[in-house]
């Protein structure tokens, strides 16, 4: 199991799939009509991303490019931090 970050956004302009699920570690996003569906679609998108990289023999290279590190127990995702910025509009 790999601990990953999921950010959920709501785009009210979209009628069919207003919920967007985004994963910064893989820079992959997906959407759905509900938050739950968006999360499920994101999980599937990440699985496809990994499978395709594996199929082409590029998984290790791709994970390293994304900032993942390997240790004895497996891959460690890059550190993702969230900060609050105050912008003057």
Image (tube, rainbow, N blue to C red):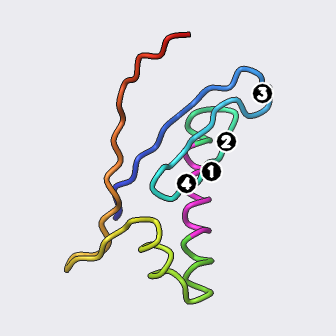
Residue wearing tag 3: 14
Q: Residue at x 62, y 37 (%)?
A: 20
Q: CA distance from mark 4 to mark 2?
A: 14 Å
Mark 1 and mark 3 lie on one chain; the one further toward the N terminus is 3
Q: Return the x and y of residue 34 as percentages of the image width and height.
A: 63, 32
Q: CA distance from mark 1 to mark 3?
A: 16 Å
The relative height of residue 16 versus residue 41 in the rendered view (above or below) is above
Q: Residue at x 22, y 77 (%)?
A: 71
64 in magenta:
no
- Range of magenta residues: 39-49
Residue wearing tag 1: 41
Q: Quadrant of residue 32?
A: top right
The one nearer the camera, 6 or 44, is: 6
**Image depth: mark 4 or mark 2 in front:** 4
Looking at this rendering, what residue extends furthest in the top direction? Answer: 89
Residue wearing tag 4: 27
Query: Which label number is shown at residue 31?
Result: 2
Q: Residue at x 39, y 65 (%)?
A: 67
Q: CA distance from mark 1 to mark 2?
A: 7 Å
**Image depth: mark 3 or mark 4 in front:** 4
């Amino acid at each position: 199991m790999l601990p990953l970050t999921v950010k959920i956004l709501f785009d009210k302009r979209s009628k069919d799939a207003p919920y967007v699920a985004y994963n910064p570690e893989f820079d992959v996003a997906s959407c759905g009509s509900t938050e739950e569906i968006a999360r499920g679609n994101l999980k599937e998108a990440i699985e496809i991303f990994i499978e395709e990289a594996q199929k082409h023999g590029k998984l290790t290279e791709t994970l390293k490019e994304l900032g993942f590190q390997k240790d004895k127990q497996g891959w460690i995702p890059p550190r993702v931090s969230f900060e609050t910025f105050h912008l003057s509009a």
